[in-house]
Image: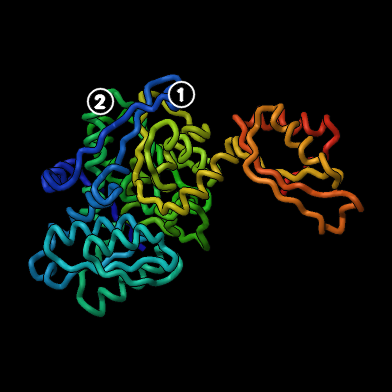
Amino acid sequence: MTVPSELVTLAEIQAARQLLAGVTRLTPVEPCRPLTAKLSGPTWLKCENLQRAGSFKVRGAYVRISRLSPDERRRGVVAASAGNHAQGVALAAGLLGTKATVFMPVGAPLPKIAATKGYGARVDFAGATVDESLEAAHEFAERTGAVLIHPFDHPDIIAGQGTVGLEILEQVPEVRTIVTGVGGGGLISGLAAAVKAVRPDVRIIGVQAAGAASFARSLRAGCPVRLESVATIADGIAVGRPGDLTFAHVGKLVDEIVTVTDEDISRALLMLLERGKLVVEPAGSVGVAALLAGAVEVETPTVAVLSGGNIDPMLMLRVIEHGLAAAGRYLAFTVRCGDRPGHLAKLLSSIAEQGANVVDVAHRRQDPRLQLGEVEIGMSVETRGAEHSDRLVSALRSAGYTVTFDL
């Protein structure tokens, strides 16, 4: 394997920005008070979740397709994506008058599928991962002559995504650290190429989901390495292998790659929704997750890129509940007590005295471990945080209740 040595230049990113004038939005940067307080310095959010088609992906897709020859556009384009690149390609192809076919993994989020079709693309399903869908897209390109629009590993894609970096430098000229999510590496490659060319002192930090940390492993190996499997709620960055070109950019320009857990991501989504009033998908929030979790040390002013906002509403419900539990604000436990009149009322009064709100109650009498006259009561309660949850459990145990948690 030959790893490309030439990186995308500042001039190429500036040229891409001219192509995107009037096509993409100048997305806002918003101050984030919770992160500013945690980091003891100004922290901003670059809101690419508010970009056209819901993510930064339209930037690179439009630049790539706009540079195709008339003959190539007549043959159409093909792409593979879990959803954001799919929508970016579909939108860009429609704007530029070419037909698009997109291969998506089986089980891709329904809103992303519907949006991709809504922009005019044909959607086919192949494989369980983006990598498997990409193989199908390659085969389709060879069979039909359609031009493959790679989700990250092409200079035009990287140059288009790099325009995010140019905007950050203009919107937050005093920035010292930029944190962004990493899947295949197109965004961080372009962002780093733009920022380092103008401000080499700015630290660029990439964040991957712990269950899809292909760059961390590849950097240790010194070359792109494919993961055996990926498992994360952040489907938008669940990429099993870095691109050759993006690996070269990250290796030379990015200061650090860190990972976050799905629990960290859930907490970040909850904070962004509650405090920032921002709808962000799991993959789009990993930069914020890393800052909240203390996974990286930064120098402020800091900018975290919110790279996408295309979240399935059903996943949002599950993530909110998971985020509440991870933050100690949603507590599920089992209490064992006597199965006699008045015992449930007494238990509920004890919980109310601690200021917790009961969400759900379920009786279980069939467990063979129960003694005659005993009942297990499954409880779900809302609390004000981890300390409040601990006080509630301690109070119940002090009152003689056996409190257990499902593993």
Q: Relative to 75, is 386 above or below?
A: above
Q: Is residue 4 left or right of residue 205?
A: left
C-alpha span from label 2 to label 1: 19 Å
Please name the residue shown 25% across and 80% down the image.
Answer: 143
Secondary structure beneath disc 2?
loop
Please name the residue shown 17% across and 70% down the image.
Answer: 76
In this figure, which residue is indicated by the disc labeled 1?
Answer: 39
Instruction: Tell me if label 2 and label 1 are in contact, CB under 8 Å.
Output: no
In this figure, which residue is indicated by the disc labeled 2?
Answer: 173
Q: Colour mode?
A: rainbow
Please tell me which residue lies in front, 275 or 136.
275
Q: Relative to 355, is 330 above or below?
A: below
- Outermost residue, right direction? 372
Badge 2 amino acid: Pro
Q: In the picture, residue 81 is in which quadrant?
A: bottom left
Crowding at mark 2 (Cα within 10 Å: few <14, some 14-19, many 20+) = few
Percent coordinates x, y for residue 366 in the rendering: 82, 59
Percent coordinates x, y for residue 134 in the rendering: 35, 67
